[in-house]
Image (cartoon, helix red, strand yellow):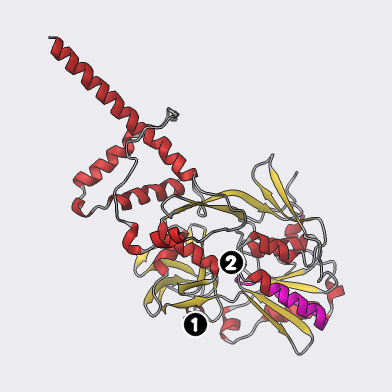
């Protein structure tokens, strides 16, 4: 009898401990997701040898899942969450899935983390495994192999934000605003941005087929694109024969500040009759570069406001140079202008330093931080939203131009640029446009 009681007590202790260890994994998982260093900016990333090594495809999905039943010192767990359900699903997949012998636990684990991040309902908060994380780092460096197009999620649909100039996507005919319904025949419904980038990117010389729909199409069309090496030169500066200086900025990447500083020096030396900053199809990039750029017109005061909550805001101030403040300036934008582009356009518009010409911008006004995790994967988290100096929310709304001018498909196919022509018209008679204001500048958020 005594032996039976001892066995029952022992079994009860084992079951209690097992239940506690399973539940404690949830806490450990949360701690894992919060690990890593903080980097500020619209996007920020650091490359290191560990990330590069772990990002090799052959090593990403090898090894065992560790910490499955590990104890934590803190026993905190929300009473509304029974994490036994996680292991119940895990076990049933491994035992009952038709091809259960092919299941890789690392893939299951990374898939669970992607689901955890996507459950917050924000398309820019994502978990990236080491391969995807490495690709994201390469994007910011400006060198990678793919098609050369920035993509985003618009109205829950994967959308081409910006085909980069002279890159395979543009040469194949992709345009800003194109909706991507499938990648190599796989539906993009519910896909995250970073998953889509990973599917589209590939080795130079290999094909990828995107199923595209745009307003001028009757039905979606398949467009095959041959991938190439994408090296982005983010700033192109030209002095026109009519004395107008045009600066085309394709991204806010690692080289942008240096190249833009060179253009500013050339503008000051050449003393043009006006300046056009072309931010069309510019998907954004580093926050600091956007602030530095806007500071060439704005001497002091606010450039952009970072709103974390109703009670917490961070104001980014101009750097005090304003070398271009004396030049009449027009900023060109369209539906492919996003993020850092919208920060610059919104700041110059609110501070009356430039006229904005073109079409409503994309409306990507949220702030992400990139948390580097222990195995080379990373977690990109939306932590705040951008406001213009007057308090307008960039996110979803975008920046409305002072002078709305469209560029049609027919214009595009015939190499006609009515937006650039309108910008030149504005510069030719700048004073007559002095009081022109976009309707949305009156939509001020209450402090």
Image position of 336 with respect to 288: above or below? below
User: Which residue bears the numbered disc 1?
Assistant: 171
- Image position of 426 (left or right of 6): right
Q: Nearer the viewer, residue 262 or 363?
A: 262
Write the residue at 57% across / 53% down. Answer: 368
Task: Identify the residue at the far left of this view.
Answer: 1
Answer with left or right where residue 417 lies relative to residue 55: right
In the rendered image, residue 176, in percent from the top left (x then y), is placed at: 55, 71
Residues at marks 1 and 2, CA–CA distance in whole angstroms: 18 Å
**Of the residues under marks 1 and 2, which one precedes in the sequence?**
1
Highlighted magenta segment, given as a residue range: 260-282
Q: Is residue 429 above or below residue 199?
A: below
218 or 312: nearer the viewer:
312
The magenta stretch spans residue 280: yes
Number of numbered discs overlaid on the protein picture? 2
Queried whether the magenta region covers residue 189, the answer comes back as: no
Q: Which residue is mark 2?
A: 283
Q: Does residue 288 appear in the picture of this structure?
A: yes
Above or below: residue 291 compared with residue 8: below
Displayed quadrant of residue 132: bottom left
The local secondary structure at tag 2 comes to: loop
Circle number at residue 328: none
Q: Quadrant of residue 74?
A: top left
């Amino acid at each position: 009898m005594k032996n039976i009681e001892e066995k029952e007590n022992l079994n009860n202790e084992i079951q209690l401990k097992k239940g506690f260890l399973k539940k404690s994994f949830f806490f450990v998982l949360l701690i894992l997701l919060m690990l890593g260093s903080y980097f500020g900016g619209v996007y920020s990333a650091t490359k290191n040898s560990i990330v590069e090594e772990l990002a090799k495809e052959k090593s990403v999905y090898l090894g065992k899942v560790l910490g499955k039943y590990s104890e934590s010192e803190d026993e905190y767990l929300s009473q509304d969450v029974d994490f036994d359900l996680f292991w119940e699903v895990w076990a049933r997949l491994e035992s009952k899935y038709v091809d259960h012998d092919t299941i890789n636990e690392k893939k299951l684990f990374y898939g669970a983390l992607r689901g955890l991040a996507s459950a917050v309902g924000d398309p820019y908060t994502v978990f990236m495994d080491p391969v995807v994380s490495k690709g994201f780092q390469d994007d910011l460096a400006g060198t990678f192999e793919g098609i050369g197009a920035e993509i985003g999620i618009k109205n829950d649909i994967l959308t081409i934000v910006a085909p980069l100039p002279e890159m395979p996507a543009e040469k194949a005919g992709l345009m800003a605003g194109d909706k991507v319904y499938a990648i190599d025949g796989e539906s993009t419904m519910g896909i995250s941005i970073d998953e889509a980038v990973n599917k589209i990117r590939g080795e130079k010389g290999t094909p990828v087929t995107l199923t595209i729909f745009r307003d001028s199409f009757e039905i979606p069309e398949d467009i095959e694109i041959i991938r190439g090496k994408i090296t982005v030169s983010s700033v192109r500066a030209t002095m026109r024969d009519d004395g107008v200086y045009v600066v085309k900025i394709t991204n806010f990447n690692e080289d942008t500040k240096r190249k833009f500083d060179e253009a500013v020096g050339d503008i000051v030396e050449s003393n043009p009759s006006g300046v056009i900053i072309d931010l069309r199809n510019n998907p954004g990039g580093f926050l600091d570069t956007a602030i530095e750029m806007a500071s060439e017109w704005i001497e002091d005061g606010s450039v952009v406001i970072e709103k974390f909550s109703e009670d917490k805001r961070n104001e980014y101030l101009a750097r005090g140079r304003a070398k271009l403040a004396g030049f009449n300036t027009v900023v060109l934008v369209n539906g492919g202008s996003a993020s850092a582009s919208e920060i610059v356009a919104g700041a110059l518009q609110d501070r009356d330093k430039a006229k904005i010409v073109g079409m409503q911008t994309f409306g990507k006004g949220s702030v992400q931080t990139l948390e580097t995790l222990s195995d080379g994967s990373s977690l990109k988290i939306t932590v705040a939203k951008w406001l213009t100096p007057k308090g307008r929310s960039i996110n979803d709304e975008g920046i409305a131009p002072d002078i709305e001018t469209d560029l049609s498909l027919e214009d595009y196919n015939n190499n006609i640029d009515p937006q650039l022509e309108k910008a030149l018209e504005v510069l030719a008679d700048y004073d007559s446009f002095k009081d022109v204001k976009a309707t949305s500048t009156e939509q001020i958020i209450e402090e």
